[in-house]
Structure formats: structure tokens, C-alpha cells
């Protein structure tokens, strides 16, 4: 292990490189890559890596394609023939890639993608907003939202172990906030290759395309689709338990325990909860400490795994809270925050659950903004429609 | 060039045990794409192949899960992605020292239109792929809409009065990438066709084959006339049978006689040209001009 000063973009590329090299004795590693701000540094670093095995044979193929749509298509071709695969994208790139994002999951391929969350345009805005990956919530991928650089690094490695598990076989998207993480350099614990090998077994795809004359991804009648969707959904259902095994294995090998699907902060005696994802939660912690100092029993809940949706964990975390603020850095236009829409039913019956849509387009969410939401929540006698909170630049 | 009176191809002793296109498939009678598959089957012989087929009639051919009418492994890709999915497969095969050929088999919609950027990029990168476009000049799978391969004057469900533009010159486009081998294939010239499939299979780097594939359903023609239609297209000069090496050296493989009667017959036998006021003189002039260009390039 060594401590390196890395941006989260470079942390993701470094983790993917290690995961790729760890598969050199098996079918190797690769992916299609295409630049987009603020993800580009990730694929640039990936393109500088050497994937030769101990005999000098090339066991990595990074294909510089002409679009995100093809980046995912190359990953699909590689994964179907047994390689471990990685790509990265963001915002409109993900929107352009979408058809093959769905396809990757429907082929049941454990592709890992790093996504830098960025506002969808036009008008063009390169700052953080979770709407790009939340729009892919029904794509059949496992989704993680990270709070810091180390978490991005660790979650990439976890994603391979989790997605490639024969009980799961699903692609995984690992999200990080634009610039807040992607371009911020932090000391990151980078393990050596042998340690990574102990955590990541060789990848074997049970339905690998080889010599059998089968058609993969051909036609389904309704009766087959019903079964395929049920199987896919059931695989999602197995993720929480397999993820806990991955956490144990990770802790055993690397000596630190990755965060749970739902992470709590000072929730033990809380009667008011603030729910958020990704780096917004760091600000929430600060606001909670300040509120606690004023005698308010506030606590925080971070949704780290968004798909499969950790409903029971969230229900347990929110427990007895009478008031819940759900902070969304995204908006489903015509509805409200996506996180709110999906988690409001997890609060206890009769609780006041208020949605605050905040920091759209990357506006800086300050502790005082969170504090104002908390005060608003405490003053309420009933929940209202989602509030769009403007924080400015 | 010998032109057999009867064409199409029967499975014989010298063909691979598992034909590429198996019996029991649901393709239309007289389907040109099916004939192309039989030619390919003979050329593939004992070679190990993996195929990528995007959305098109060719993937409906495979039949519903878990069956497959193909005698080789097939990946059904999204419409625009055949060349990119195949890129991934070919790279992994090479990385693992596997001696196999990865083939794309796509219609004109997936080649000329929606898959064009992907195809162009794979050719530019020099991927080790054989890309076969079976061109029935129509979105056949969706019931017959115009594509950029639909010829001038052809009626389709989206050009009910006949298409007012000509078709893209796909061979010139692919040759402009400087790829090692690009060729057109006539189903009426099986020896030339099988030889080209075999050469394209053996070559390395990006190879492109363009097959004119009659579609009786879309062309509103007699299923039994498909091969004859191709022969007329070749004889009249409408469909040049040639190959291009390294994007520069054009070679004509079948010399047409530019027969005006053959040209008129080609259009008259297809319902899609009926009542569209196609100007035969203008078509003949366009053919002449095209051939001047071709011969200038060494053909």
C-alpha cells in the first residue's frame, strides 16, 4: 500500500488499472473510451497504462472510439468474450450512451463504469448534478454514489467483485461529484497489485461467447421476457447480501471497511433526519454538528447504494424520526427530487417528509443552506410540495 | 465470367457440417440475404468465426430465444453498434491468441445510416474485422422504409412517390478509409462471390464487402427473379462488381455490356419503380459517369 495524491478521476483510473492487471492471467482487460468534461482525466490516465503480463503479453486493450455509444459497445463486445471491462463518462455523454447502457445490463455483463455527475444540457453547464445517472436508474445497473476520493477508489474494486459474482452478474456504475471530487486531489490509499489480486478473483463469464453456436441477445417472446426480467430483478435482490460479503472480504484484505449501502451520522437518538447523497452529505454532517450544538437532535442518512434501492436499510435508519428532510441534487421535472420520490415511503407513518431540491447545476451548498432547510423543516406542521432552494453560484 | 442459369447454392459434401444458415429459419422466399449467407457458409469452411448482427432482418433470421438459426456464435447488437461490439470481441480474441475471425453482418440501414459513424471509426482504427453489408436498399425489417441506400425513384412506405435522391456510394466511402480490402459482391456470380468472401476472411485488418441483396417483399418483385435482377443490375452497369485494395487500386471483376434493355428490364421487373416516372436516360447517364470515375481510379 502507498499513499498517493490523486484526484477522484485518477483514483478511478488507478483502481480500474489494478483491477485490469489482476485479470491478466484470465481473459485480460479493456474498454472503449471517449472524452467528456469533467471525466476526461480518468480515461487519459487509463490510456497511459501498461497492461502487459509477466511474460510481456499485452493483456489490456483500451479502444479510443468515436462516441460514448461505441465506448459502451466495445465494453459489451469485450465483456461478452470474457474480458474485465471499464469505461467512464458523464452527463450528455451518458445520455448519448444510454441505449448501450441498457443493453450492457440486459446482456448481464459486469461492466464497471465510473460516472462523473454533471448537469445535463443545453444550456451547457459542467458542474455537479445527479440527474444524469439518476436518469439511468431503470437501466438495470447497480448504482453507487461516493462521498470522497478514497470511496471512489474502493468502490471501483468492490464493483468488480460484486458485479462479477455469479449470483449477481450485473454492471455497476460508480458515481462521483463533478469537480468537488473529480478535480480535487486527496491523499488516497493505493494497494499493490498482489493485494488487489487477493481481493479480485479471475473473471469468468458463464455465458461467454466462444464456439457454441448460440445467439446472444436475439429475440424474446413475452414469455421469455417475463422470465429474463424476473431473473434480472432477482439478481438485484441478491445484491445487498453479496455486497455485505464483499465488504467483509474487502476489510479482510485491505484493512478498512467500505461504507454500508445506507450510512448514518449521529442517528442513534435523532428525531429529525437529513437524507442526502454523495458530497452533499459532507455539508450535512457539518450542519448536523451545528444543530446538535444548539440542542436539536438531528442526524444524517446517506444513501450510498441507489440501485438496488436499499429500502429496508433506509427504513431502519429513519426509524422513529418524526421529521425528515430529503435533499436532492437533481430534479425529475414535474415530480420533484428523485431521491425524495423513492425514499419518502421509508419514513415512519405520520412523519413530516419534506423535499428540498438544492444545488442544481452545481451551486455550492453551504452549511448555512442546510441549516435554513433544517429550520424550515422544524417550523412545519405538514410537508408541502418539493421546495426548489436557490443557492446561487 | 461464367453465369450459371440457376443460382443460389445447395449444401454439398464439401461444405461445413453445420451450415451458417440452418434449415428451419423463417426468411422470406427469394431472400437475397439468405443466399449471401449460403455463399459465406461455403467460404467460411472450417474457419472459426464469431458474428455480430445488429438490428436488421438478419437478426430476425436467428429466431426466438433460445433457438438460433445460425451455425456460428452470434451477438445481436444494438442497431448502430455492430462494428464497435465486434471491435471488442476481435481485440479480446487477439489478446488471448485465439485464431478466429469476427464478422459483422448488417443491412443497409445499419451500415449506410445509423451505423455509419461506428463503421467509419472501426475502419479508421484498422480493426481486424470483416464487415459484410447485405444491401436490400430498404429498411426491410420494419416493413420497407427508405434508407440512404434506396435508389433514385424507388417507392417505399416513406417515399410513396418514389425517392428523389440517389444512393450513397458506399464502396467509395469505405475505400476512402484506405482499408486493405473492399469489394462488391454479385449473387449472380457465385464463383467471384465465394472467392471474395474467402479472400476477405483470410485478410487481416478492416475488410468490407457490399452485397446487393434482392428483397422480393420490399422490391415488389417475383421471389424467383432475385438472381436475375442482380444479373441485370450487373450487366447494365448499375451495380459494378469490383474490388479495391488499400483504398486505391480499383479492379473491375465483371465487365458489364451497358445494355439498355437489361436496364429497362431491371426496373420493369420491380413494383417499387412502377409509376414513379423514372427517367431511364438520366439513369443511363449517371451510370456512364460513375463508370468513368471508376475507370479513372484504375478499374
Image (tube, rainbow, N blue to C red):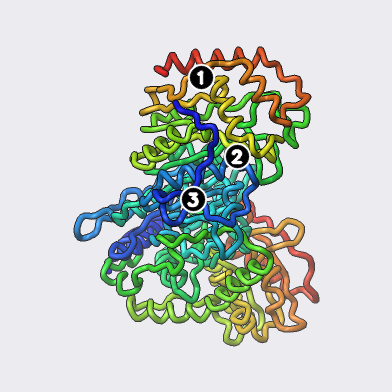
Residue A387, image x and y in percent? Answer: 73, 62
Q: Which numbered circle lies on residue B109?
A: 2
SS label for mark 1: loop
Instruction: Left or right? Give the position of A214 relative to B30.
Output: left
Residue A208, image x and y in percent? Answer: 43, 64
Label 3 crowd (10 A; few <14 / some 14-19 / many >=20): many
B73 or B176: nearer the eye? B73
B81 or B190: nearer the eye? B190
* Quarter where residue B289 is shown: top right
SS label for mark 3: strand
Q: Which numbered circle lies on residue B52?
A: 3
At x 44%, y 26%, the residue is: B1
Residue A103, image x and y in percent? Answer: 56, 57
Q: Earlier in the sequence, mark 2 or mark 3?
A: 3
Q: Which numbered circle lies on residue B256?
A: 1
Q: Are marks 2 and 3 on the same chain?
A: yes
Q: CA distance from mark 1 to mark 3?
A: 34 Å
Q: Earlier in the sequence, mark 1 or mark 3?
A: 3
* Pointer 1 chain: B
Amino acid at each position: 500500500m502507498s499513499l498517493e495524491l490523486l484526484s477522484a478521476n485518477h483514483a478511478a483510473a488507478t483502481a480500474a488499472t489494478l483491477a485490469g492487471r489482476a485479470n491478466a492471467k484470465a481473459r485480460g482487460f479493456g474498454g472503449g473510451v471517449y472524452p467528456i468534461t469533467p471525466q476526461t482525466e480518468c480515461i487519459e490516465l487509463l490510456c497511459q497504462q501498461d497492461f502487459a503480463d509477466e511474460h510481456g503479453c499485452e493483456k489490456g486493450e483500451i479502444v479510443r472510439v468515436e462516441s460514448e455509444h461505441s465506448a459502451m459497445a466495445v465494453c459489451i463486445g469485450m465483456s461478452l468474450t470474457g474480458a474485465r471491462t471499464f469505461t467512464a463518462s458523464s452527463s450528455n455523454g451518458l445520455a448519448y450512451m444510454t441505449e448501450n447502457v441498457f443493453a450492457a445490463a440486459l446482456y448481464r455483463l459486469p461492466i464497471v463504469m465510473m460516472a462523473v455527475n454533471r448537469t445535463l444540457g443545453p444550456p451547457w453547464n459542467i458542474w455537479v448534478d445527479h440527474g444524469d445517472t439518476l436518469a439511468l436508474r431503470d437501466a438495470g445497473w447497480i448504482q453507487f454514489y461516493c462521498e470522497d476520493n478514497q470511496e471512489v477508489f474502493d468502490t471501483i474494486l468492490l464493483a468488480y467483485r460484486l458485479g462479477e459474482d455469479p449470483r449477481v452478474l450485473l454492471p455497476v456504475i460508480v458515481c462521483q461529484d463533478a469537480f468537488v471530487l473529480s478535480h480535487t486531489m486527496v491523499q488516497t490509499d493505493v494497494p499493490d497489485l498482489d493485494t488487489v489480486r487477493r481481493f479480485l478473483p479471475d473473471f469468468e463469464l458463464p455465458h461467454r461467447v466462444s464456439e457454441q453456436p448460440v445467439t446472444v441477445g436475439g429475440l424474446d417472446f413475452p414469455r421469455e421476457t417475463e422470465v429474463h426480467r424476473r431473473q434480472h430483478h432477482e439478481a438485484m435482490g441478491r445484491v445487498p447480501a453479496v455486497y455485505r460479503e464483499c465488504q467483509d472480504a474487502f476489510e479482510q484484505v485491505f484493512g478498512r471497511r467500505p461504507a454500508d449501502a445506507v450510512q448514518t451520522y449521529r442517528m442513534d437518538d435523532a428525531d429529525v433526519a437529513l437524507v442526502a447523497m454523495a458530497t452533499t452529505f459532507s455539508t450535512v454532517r457539518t450542519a448536523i454538528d451545528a444543530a446538535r450544538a444548539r440542542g436539536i437532535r438531528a442526524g444524517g442518512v446517506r444513501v450510498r447504494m441507489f440501485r438496488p434501492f436499499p429500502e429496508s436499510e433506509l427504513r431502519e435508519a429513519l426509524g422513529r424520526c418524526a421529521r425528515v428532510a430529503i435533499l436532492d441534487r437533481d430534479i425529475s421535472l414535474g415530480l420533484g427530487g428523485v431521491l425524495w420520490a423513492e425514499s419518502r415511503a421509508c419514513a415512519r407513518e405520520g412523519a413530516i417528509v419534506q423535499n428540498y431540491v438544492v444545488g442544481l447545476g452545481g451551486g455550492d451548498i453551504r452549511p448555512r443552506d442546510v441549516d435554513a432547510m433544517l429550520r424550515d423543516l422544524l417550523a412545519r406542521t405538514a410537508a408541502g410540495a418539493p421546495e426548489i432552494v436557490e443557492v446561487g453560484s | 465470367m461464367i453465369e450459371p442459369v440457376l443460382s443460389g447454392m445447395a449444401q454439398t459434401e464439401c461444405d461445413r457440417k453445420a451450415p451458417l444458415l440452418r434449415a428451419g429459419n423463417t426468411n422470406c422466399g427469394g431472400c437475397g440475404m439468405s443466399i449471401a449467407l449460403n455463399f459465406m457458409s461455403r467460404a467460411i469452411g472450417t474457419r472459426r468465426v464469431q458474428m455480430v448482427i445488429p438490428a436488421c432482418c438478419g437478426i430476425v433470421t436467428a429466431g426466438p430465444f433460445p433457438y438460433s438459426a445460425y451455425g456460428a456464435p452470434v451477438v445481436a447488437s444494438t442497431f448502430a453498434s455492430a462494428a464497435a461490439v465486434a471491435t471488442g470481441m476481435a481485440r479480446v480474441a487477439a489478446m488471448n491468441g485465439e485464431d478466429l475471425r469476427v464478422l459483422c453482418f448488417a443491412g443497409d440501414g445499419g451500415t449506410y445510416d445509423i451505423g455509419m459513424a461506428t463503421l467509419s471509426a472501426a475502419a479508421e482504427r484498422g480493426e481486424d474485422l470483416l464487415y459484410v453489408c447485405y444491401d436490400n436498399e430498404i429498411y426491410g425489417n420494419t416493413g420497407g422504409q427508405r434508407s440512404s441506400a434506396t435508389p433514385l425513384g424507388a417507392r417505399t412506405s416513406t417515399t410513396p412517390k418514389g425517392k428523389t435522391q440517389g444512393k450513397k456510394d458506399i464502396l467509395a466511402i469505405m475505400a476512402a478509409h484506405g482499408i486493405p480490402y473492399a469489394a462488391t459482391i454479385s449473387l449472380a456470380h457465385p464463383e467471384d462471390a465465394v472467392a471474395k468472401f474467402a479472400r476477405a476472411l483470410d485478410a487481416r485488418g478492416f475488410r468490407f464487402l457490399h452485397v446487393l441483396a434482392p428483397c422480393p417483399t420490399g422490391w415488389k418483385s417475383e421471389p424467383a427473379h432475385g438472381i436475375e435482377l442482380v444479373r441485370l443490375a450487373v450487366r447494365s452497369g448499375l451495380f459494378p462488381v469490383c474490388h479495391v485494395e488499400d483504398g486505391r487500386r480499383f479492379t473491375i471483376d465483371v465487365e458489364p455490356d451497358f445494355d439498355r434493355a437489361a436496364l429497362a428490364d431491371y426496373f420493369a421487373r420491380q413494383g417499387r419503380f412502377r409509376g414513379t416516372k423514372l427517367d431511364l436516360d438520366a439513369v443511363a447517364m449517371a451510370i456512364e459517369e460513375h463508370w468513368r470515375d471508376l475507370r479513372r481510379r484504375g478499374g
